[in-house]
Every structure is written in structure tokens, then in C-alpha cells.
Amino acid sequence: MTETVKPNPLSPEFNASAASTAYRSALEVIGAVEPRIAAAITQELADQRSSLKLIASENYASPAVLLTMGNWFSDKYAEGTVGHRFYAGCQNVDTVEALAAEHARELFGAEYAYVQPHSGIDANLVAFWSVLAARVEAPALVEAGVRNVNDLAENDWTTLRRAFGDQRLLGMSLDVGGHLTHGFRPNISGKMFTHASYGTDPVTGLIDYDVVRAQAKEFKPLILMAGYSAYPRKVNFAKMREIADEVGATLIVDMAHFAGLVAGKVFTGEFNPVPFAHITTTTTHKSLRGPRGGAILAQPEFAEFVDRGCPMVLGGPLSHVMAAKAVAFAEARQPAFATYAQAVADNAVTLAEGLLKRGGKLVTGGTENHLVLLDVTSFGLTGRQAESALVDSGIVTNRNSVPQDPNGAWYSSGVRLGTPALTSRGFGAAEFDRTAELIVDVLTAATPLSAASGGLSKAKYNLPADVAAKTQAAAAEILDANPLYPGLDIS
Ligand code: DSN
């Protein structure tokens, strides 16, 4: 007989009574010093419990992961790497970091893992410096008469870039779902490299690998970057590696968004970046459902350079977070995580179909991962108006550009919807179809305020109060049926 247990992997191993005692005691201790912080922590749980969280980059970590971060590892300095520290007394940090790296290697089938990065940006920076160091540093610096990059004048990016031979990075365009840290000006990666980006096909919205290949041949990048934060499809990393090899580039894949789908074996073969990328970077808190942080997997030739991440690029390792990464990776190695990851992808398809059948327009027409990009221009709204109308109704998303966005990045024309968080609560097909219905109801009822009616910006809108109230009540119903941290009694 088929088992019909809902995929809520947080529940089976979750000892609600022990977690309630732990958190109540912690809040009592915190509240004795600064009660407003204890109150804010309590309120954050209440708020997270009571909203339909569809932010594609967010999730709910298990109490085991969260509790692992609140301890005395926070007090320890441990610059360096396992067995090679700039401080004494790091034996327990060594245990933690070695275990986290071992779990990461096993989880992703990687030969080398580095678990120190504090965030995805940090992980990418370490990866960039590693490629520069491995492939460029020595000859280019010597030729430029620079003995050490630390000798360069502060903020002298032109000098720095010349020293490194003005290297190039080709990454996915921000406009079609790429990430800021893949060579864009507001991020340091855009200052370190001469940058070019590849887009998507204007009709299908998909990456055209022949176009990427042609661009790479023309541009000859040192680094070919793959990965995204708002592209709702799989990427063929085997093809990306082929392109990188053809032009002598190093392939870095930033799998921050979909690491959980790789860990859970939803993305396998050519869609699993780890065997193909020279360096794979990630965050640990998105679909992977760990603590807020980053990690790097690399092929052995880059290991010695990545190992220098701290102090080259990173501050002292956050040992308490590395400990929580070890716990999260251990969780992700359990069969329940694969069930969860598959449910994340299945739920995204349900959400996409629920929106499509109610008249929604989706970038690329659907999804193959954990996110859906809804083009809200068909509702006559900007992304900003849609995001706000949904928040008023208890639905938390984030506005996002769509390809060739007429409203620019600030107001945008889309909302990005992700399934990892609500799937962790136990949402399945019925709940995601209902969620799609609620989203369409709100966006249909919301109207932009034109200049004539007193509104002046692409941010203003009108949403009938009864629609917001009705949606909030309907959302509360499905949220109550799928409680976050069931039995965790904090008030
Ligand atoms: N801020 C993350 C996101 O929302 O996609 C990426 O860094």
C-alpha cells in the first residue's frame, strides 16, 4: 500500500517538547538582559508562522540547525584551515570544520569542500580569487612589478585589474535571472573583471547554448559563470563545461538557489554542476535548508587556493555556523531530504500550472526547479504593486525583473515565487494550487493608481480591503493546517 504521509521532513525528527524547553529557556536568559530582543525573536516566529512565505531564496531550518548556532563556538577565533590555524586552542573548531567539510563532500560527491564562507557573495569572492591565483597571479603580477596585491593602493581597481591582466568574466545577465555577484557593477565582481553577460532566447526565455558558445569564443573569458537567482529552468552544466573548455575558461557554477535540488538528487547527470564545474559555490540557507552561510566545492587543482580564503578574502570563520552547516548537511544526507527536494520541484510545477490555468503568464512558460517567475503585466500591474498587494494579503514574495523588463529593476514587472519554505511546512499539491488561486485573486482585484487618480508612481495601487481580508483568512486556513515547527510552544 502506498504511504500517504505528507512530506514534512522537519517533523519526524523534531522533538517539539525538547525544542520548546530549549527556546523558552533561551528566551528567558536573553529577556533578562534585553527583553525587546527576546520579544523580537518571539515575534519573528509568530510572523513566519502566519505568512505564506514564497520567497524563493528562503526556507525554514530545523530546530537542530538553529540551536547549533547559539553556543560558545561563537567566541573562538580560528583563522586558517583545519590543522593550520593562526590561533591556538582550535582543536574543537577543527573537529567541526572537518566534519562539515566531510558531510559536504559526501552529500555532493565532491573531492574537496570548504565550509568557511559567511555568505554566497563571500563564496564567490573566494572562488574568483582562487581562479586568479591559480591561473593568473604569479606571471601577471611579476610582469606588472607588483609583489603582493596587498601593496596596491586602496580602491585602485584599475591598477589591480592591470596587474591581473584585465581578466574577463562571462555570466548570465541580471536581466534574465543572473546574480549581482556574477560580474555586475554594484558588486565588487563587476569591478574586478571586465564583464559580459549572456541572455536568454527572447521567444522561449531559455538559455541558448550556441549563443553562449559564440559569445565565449568572441569574448574569451577567464571565468565562465553559470547559475542564477531567478531563472526557472534547469541548466545543462555539461554543455557549459564544454564551452568553458573550448575557450580555455574556468567554469564556476553558483548553485546557491538550487543546492537543495542537487543534494536531494533532483538535479542529476548533466544538470548536477558538481562533476562539471571547476568550482561550485553555494549558500547553505536556501533550498539546502541549513544555516545562513556559504560553501565551496572544488576540483582538487583549486583546493590549495580556496583553502586560503581566510584570511585572503574572509574574516575569521564563524565556527558556530560551520557546526550548524555540519548538522544541516547531515540532515540533507538522510533519505527524507530527497523526498523533500522532489516535493519542492513537484510543488513548483503545481504552482506554475495553477497560475497558468487561471490566466497567469510565466517567464519560460513554466518551471523545472524551485521557482516560478510570474509576469504581472497581464494584470496591469508592476512588480512593485503586485508585491505590495500580495503582502497586504498575507502572501510574501519579492518583485523581480522579467526579461526585457519595461519597468526596470526597481519597479520591475514580475514576482518571483519559490516553493522551498512552504514545502518544509508540509505543503503539497492541494495547498500550492490553492496558493496559486489566492495569488491570482489578489492580482486580479488589485488595480494600479494612475496619475489622474492621484497616484504618481509605479508603486501605487488599490486593493479592495475585503479581498485582502478574505485572502488573509484563506491563507491562515492552509497555514494552520500545516503548522511551522508543530508543537513548538513559544509565546
Ligand atoms: N538574495 C538572494 C536571492 O533572493 O536570490 C540571492 O543572493
Image (spheres, rainbow, N blue to C red):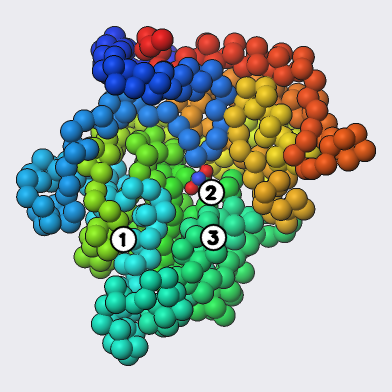
Name the amino acid type tagged 2: Ser
Image spot of residue 201 (x, y percent): 68, 60
Q: Position of residue 286 (x, y in %)?
A: 44, 39
Q: Which residue is mark 2?
A: 229
Mark 1 vs ligand 1: CB below 8 Å: no
The mark that comes first in sequence, 2 or 1, is 2
From this view, report whether residue 281 is shown above or below residue 29.
below
The residue labelled by disc 3 is 186
What residue is shown at x 59% (from left), y 61% (from top)? 173
Task: Kindly identify the amino acid type of the residue bearing the numbered disc 3.
Answer: Pro
**Which quarter shows the N terminus?**
top left
Q: Mark 2 Cα within 10 Å, few/some/many (few <14, many 20+)?
A: many
Q: Quadrant of residue 27?
A: top left
Q: Nearer the viewer, mark 3 or mark 2?
A: 3
Q: Secondary structure at mark 3?
A: loop
Q: Residue at coordinates 26% horizontally, 14% vertically from top-left?
A: 25
Instruction: Report whether residue 9 is seen.
Output: no
* Quarter of the view holding residue 378: top right
Question: On the rendered image, what quadrant is the C terminus found in?
Answer: top left
Q: CA distance from mark 3 to mark 1?
A: 18 Å
Ligand 1 lies under 8 Å from the Cβ of mark 2:
yes
Measured as percent of width and height from the top left, residue 36 is found at 40, 21
What residue is drawn where x is 51% and y is 66%? 190
Around disc 3, counting alpha carbons within 10 Å, would you say few (fewer than 14), some (14 to 19), or many (20 or more)? few
Q: Secondary structure at mark 2?
A: loop
- What residue would you read off at disc 1? 313
